[in-house]
Image (spheres, coloured by chain):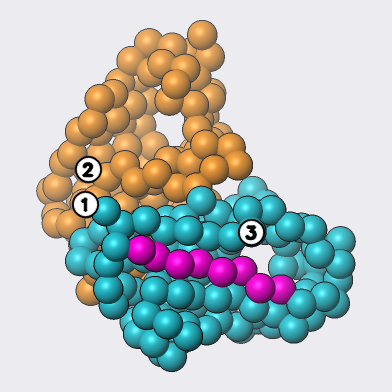
Amino acid sequence: ELKVEQNPLFLSMQEGKNYTIYCNYSTTSDRLYWYRQDPGKSLESLFVLLSNGAVKQEGRLMASLDTKARLSTLHITAAVHDLSATYFCAVDSTGAGSYQLTFGKGTKLSVIP
Amino acid sequence: SQTIHQWPATLVQPVGSPLSLECTVEGTSNPNLYWYRQAAGRGLQLLFYSVGIGQISSEVPQNLSASRPQDRQFILSSKKLLLSDSGFYLCAWSKGNTIYFGEGSWLTVV
């Protein structure tokens, strides 16, 4: 059974600071996804990482994937209040792009002014 | 452009009552369709997925069922709801390397 673990589950950080969210998974996969969820809302796709060493950046967020270590990171640079949300990583357990995703429990990020 | 519609957005149902959540996709053909559930304070769990009309795969044993009567229609049902069925239900579709989530349905079983 595929397990996806995120840490930390809760993160409170000041504006302007940097931090990293970690996502570990238990079985071989080269497809990892990051999503953002605002309270009461659906999921917004942030990054799709499809190969070992993949790195993608969008604004203050950067995601990377190390398939050998079964680890993905979501790095936040100079946080701003608008980044407050819950962030999920998800792994495609079939490895075939069929989106049978296994999600982590999420990291609730609060950026304090 | 492709769109996904999911309804109702919110519902409160008594224990033992039936459930029907509907999802339709527009602007594409033969998509893979999915139902996910998010229980309070938890991540999302895949419930069902479908690769074609009448083809349903279940990931988790439960008192829920899914049907795909048309190519772009996916329905989540229950004959008798349990308290543990409360949560946020998300329909999604995918084609190629992209998955799109609907706006979600909040279900509270009382």
User: Hey, what amino acid is under mark 1?
Assistant: Leu
Of helix, strand and loop, which mostly describes the magenta segment? strand
Q: Which chain is orange?
A: A
Q: Quadrant of residue B20?
A: bottom right
Whether B20 is among the magenta residues is yes
Q: Quadrant of residue A102?
A: bottom left
- Residue ID for mark 1: A49
- Residue ID for mark 3: B8
Circles 1 and 3 on the same chain: no
Q: Are marks 1 and 2 in contact (CB under 8 Å)?
A: yes
The chain to which mark 3 is attached is B
Q: How many marks?
A: 3
Q: Where A62 sits versus B42, above or below?
A: above
x, y (%) of residue B3? Answer: 37, 56
Question: At 37% from the left edge and 80% from the top edge, which residue is drawn?
Answer: B71
- Residue ID for mark 2: A64
Q: Nearer the viewer, residue A52 or B88?
A: B88
User: Left of A102 or right of it: where is B97?
Assistant: left
Q: Nearer the viewer, residue B93 or A96?
A: B93
x, y (%) of residue B110? Answer: 86, 61
x, y (%) of residue A5? Answer: 45, 53
Disc number lying in front (1 or 3):
3
The chain to which mark 1 is attached is A
Q: Nearer the viewer, residue B80 or A52?
A: B80
User: Left of B42 or right of it: where is A111?
Assistant: left
User: Hey, what amino acid is under mark 3?
Assistant: Pro
Q: Are marks 1 and 3 in contact (CB under 8 Å)?
A: no
Residue A37 visible in the current orientation: yes
